[in-house]
Each structure stands twice: as C-alpha cells, then as structure tokens.
C-alpha cells in the first residue's frame, strides 16, 4: 500500500526497560481514548489513503468495546507513533489494523504492537488470529510472517481502487502454537 509521509517528532528517550528493544526506549503502549480519534483519522488519511477509516469509523470501533480492543503507541510527549486493534469474537479474533507512522518505522514498533495484540488475544481466550493484508504490502506481509502468520486464502480484487488482492492470514495461539 502506498504510504504518505507523516511528520511526527520523536523526542530523546530514556534507556529502554529490560526486555524492550532499545529502539523503543521512551515508547509506551496505552489504551485508545476518545481524544485520540481525530488524530487517528488524520493518520489514516495519510497512511492508507483510499482505505482510511474516518472519525465516524473510529467512534464505531471505540463503541465496540469490550469486543473491540485498541492500543496506541506514544512517545514521551504522548504523540501517537502507531496503533493496533483487535476484534475478539469467541475463539477466533481478527487483527483490525496495525499502523506505524513513517517517522517511527524501523524501530520494531510494528512487531511490538503485533506482540501486544497476540498477548491480548491469548488473555481473551482466542485460539486463532486472522487478518487481511494487501498482497502488494511487502513490509506488512513480512511482519506477519515473522510473527507466525500463514496465508490461508486469497480474496481476489478485494482492495479498490486498484484491484489488489487481499491475503487472509492466520496464526494459531495457545497450546503448542505460541
């Protein structure tokens, strides 16, 4: 997916807590708040263009709690660097979105956000996680594959405009599956 530049300043950060990648020092995860919605809608327009969620879509997602579960990654000044969300439904969950601003890429933040979603899914009793990713989004596909997701089907011409296929990916959770 083409990504537009987003200007996000990253402040100097204290040393990373033990167990956290040093590149993520000063970054913390917190729950999505209603005051974040306008910022997220703006980031969506910059990051996802034709597939962007509107402020109204974000309000709908926030209203879906507790079934919907969203987290934002922020810097020391509480500026949003990325965000991710889940739909928790029975034993199967769906990764609704993961996004990292261009200024925060290359630091392992996408991996950290995805790991948090997997942790929350496990706590929520989810046995498998599903997601859809654009077939032409190599960076996202690599992230998911490195985190145990496998392609299980293809939805032809799913993303419009552009006739881009969606790859449906799954990761098993719990038991022997991680």
Image (spheres, grey):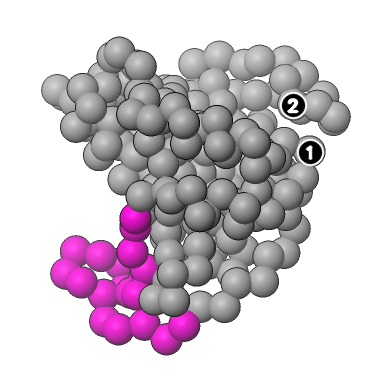
Question: Relative to 51, is 24 on the left or the right?
Answer: left
Find residue 115 and report its horizontal and vertical position in percent: 32, 45
Query: Disc number at residue 159?
Result: 2
- Tag 2 near tag 1, CB within 8 Å: yes
Write down the quadrant of residue 15 in the picture: bottom left
| For marks 2 and 1 on the same chain, the one whose residue lies earlier in the sequence | 1
Q: Residue at x 33, y 64 (%)?
A: 28
Name the foreground residue: 124 vs 33: 33
Q: Is residue 171 magenta?
A: no
Determine whether the residue tagged by mark 2 lies in a helix, strand or loop: strand
Determine whether the residue tagged by mark 1 lies in a helix, strand or loop: helix
Find residue 31 and report its horizontal and vertical position in percent: 36, 50
Q: Quickly name the residue at label 1.
A: 50
- Examine the residues drawn in magenta and state their main secondary structure: loop
Question: Relative to 32, is 36 on the left or the right?
Answer: right
Find residue 3 and report its horizontal and vertical position in percent: 72, 53
Q: CA distance from mark 2 to mark 1?
A: 9 Å
When the figure is inspected, residue 77 is found, relative to residue 55, above or below; the finding is below
Find residue 11 and report its horizontal and vertical position in percent: 46, 83
Residue 12 appears anywhere in the view: yes
When the figure is inspected, residue 3 is found, relative to residue 150, above or below; the finding is below
Q: Residue at x 27, y 37 (%)?
A: 120
Q: Residue at x 28, y 31 (%)?
A: 121
Q: Which quarter of the rendering shows the C terminus?
A: top left
When the figure is inspected, residue 79 is found, relative to residue 56, above or below; the finding is below
Q: Is residue 13 magenta?
A: yes
Instruction: Characterize the local packing of mark 1: few (<14), some (14-19) or many (20 or more) Cα atoms within 10 angstroms.
Output: some
Q: Which residues are magenta?
A: 11-30
Name the foreground residue: 72 vs 91: 72
Name the foreground residue: 110 vs 31: 31
As drawn, the residue found furthest toward the right would be 161
């Amino acid at each position: 997916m083409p990504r537009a530049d987003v200007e996000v300043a990253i402040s100097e950060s204290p040393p990373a807590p033990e167990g956290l990648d040093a590149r993520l020092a000063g970054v913390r995860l917190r729950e999505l708040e209603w005051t974040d919605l306008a910022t997220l809608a703006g980031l969506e327009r910059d990051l996802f263009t034709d597939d962007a969620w509107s402020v109204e879509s974000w309000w709908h997602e926030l209203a879906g709690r507790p079934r919907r579960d969203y987290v934002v990654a922020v810097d020391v000044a509480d500026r949003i660097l990325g965000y991710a969300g889940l739909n928790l439904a029975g034993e199967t969950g769906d990764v609704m979105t993961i996004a990292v601003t261009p200024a925060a890429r290359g630091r392992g933040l996408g991996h950290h956000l995805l790991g948090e979603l997997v942790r929350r899914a496990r706590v929520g009793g989810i046995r498998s996680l599903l997601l859809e990713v654009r077939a032409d989004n190599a960076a996202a596909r690599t992230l998911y594959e490195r985190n145990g997701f496998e392609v299980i089907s293809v939805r032809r011409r799913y993303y419009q405009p552009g006739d881009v296929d969606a790859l449906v990916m799954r990761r098993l959770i719990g038991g022997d599956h991680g």
